[in-house]
Image: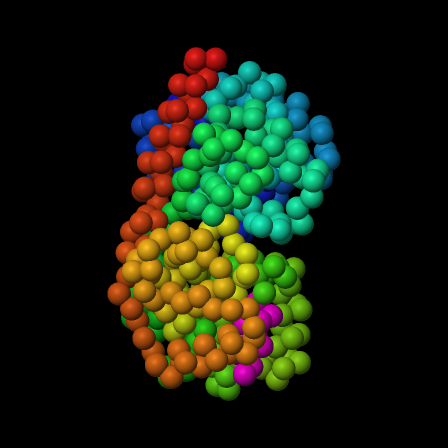
Amino acid sequence: MKIVHVITGLGIGGAEQQLRLLLRHLPPDKASCHVVTLTNPGPVADGIRSDGTAVTHLGMAGNRDLSVLPRLAALIRSGGFDLVHTHLYRACVYGRVAARLAGVRAVVATEHSLGDSQIEGRPLSAGTRALYRVTERMGAGTAAVSATVAHRLRAWGVADDRIHVVPNGIDPERFRYDAAVRATARERLGLPPAAYAVVGVGRLVPEKRFDLLIRATAANPGTRLLLTGTGPERGNLLRLAAGLGTADRVAVVSGADGGPDVPAVLAAADLFVSPSPEEAFGLAVVEALAAGLPVLYAACPAIEDLPPQDAPGALRIGGDPAQLAAAIGRQRRAGHVRLPVAAAVEHYHIAHTADRVMALYASALASARKK
């Protein structure tokens, strides 16, 4: 089976990293893959190539660059692909149309980032919804990364029989706690052995509300904060920390910048906090649980869709800075705690995700043959 994955961009982000991980776990004897990125062939593109999968950059100039359609259709046609798998809004819209132009009817999409009020950080509009619904019907179906996203798709008017819940996945071994990794990472980060460190992971954008986490850290003297990610809010967040007198206790680190990678930072930390009020899945929360960290989160469908006993170390919190500060204070008083790996981690193993994706491919191909 020859598959082409079409994605909007390959900078550092959850959907992009999830695609790379999925490609590593699709059975090579059943799936030969190629990746097309419409924009931004960033660090994840380099990683995918190093894993052995080809990546083509189409150089799309903007959301309305219609010239990408014939170029993408020609690439799909010349590549002899059996199935097109699209990821993220722009790639889903253009990828489905291009697949139809190329004569490929086996098309599936993964909906990674649909929120209640935004999609991929952009406010929803009637036009956005209409374009999504029209092009969605050109495919065989849509994989929702959580039951919450599936519910949102139904509310948009996507037929129930076209929605397939295929949760995101992680490689638990990559995040397994290691005391030696912790010691090395803390030394690199300048954290004394006794320092209590809180970590937040994600794109540095306003929607993630890392400003709340900085304010909550300022209200907990002595607490260190590690923000792991890249994005346009980096400067604003550091200025906020300086204005609150906590510049020496807040650090923005990123493996892409030569600093410790996410598993190492999680090992170095004592508490994970996700203050984002709206998430489609909440992958970083699951990664933190795999590292044995206690977790505070404002929204996380990955946890909310499971029974409470599957993630006993995760506690939902409100969006008020004072409440968040108090919750961090309570966790700090409990000391440096490492928890047993929660059942939720095995539930979201990437191997299970790959199995579900392969089943979706088989269904899409069977449907295309009938047509």
Nearer the observer, 273 or 35: 273
Residue positioned most to the bottom? 221
- How many marks the image carries: the answer is 0
Residue positioned most to the left? 340
* Residue segment shown in magenta: 210-219
* Residue 213 is a magenta residue: yes
**In the drawing, does residue 230 fall left or right of residue 342?**
right
Q: Majority secondary structure of the magenta segment? A: helix
Residue 223 point in image, percent of width and height: 47, 81
Residue 323 point in image, percent of width and height: 51, 76
Q: Give above or below for 62 relative to 85.
A: below
- At x 33% / y 36%, what residue is drawn? 355
Q: Quadrant of the N terminus?
A: top left
Nearer the observer, 148 or 96: 148
Which of the colour schemes (rainbow, by chain, secondary structure, one colour) is used? rainbow
* Residue 125 is a magenta residue: no
Camera sees residue 32:
no
- At x 61% / y 77%, what residue is drawn? 241
Q: Give above or below for 42 relative to 28.
A: below
Residue 356 point in image, percent of width and height: 36, 36
- At x 62% / y 65%, what residue is drawn? 234
Residue 353 point in image, percent of width and height: 36, 41
Camera sees residue 242:
yes
**In the drawing, does residue 95 fall left or right of residue 142?**
right
Q: Give above or below for 200 relative to 249.
A: above
Nearer the observer, 280 or 337: 280
- At x 34% / y 81%, what residue is drawn? 334
**In the drawing, does residue 335 fall left or right of residue 189?**
left
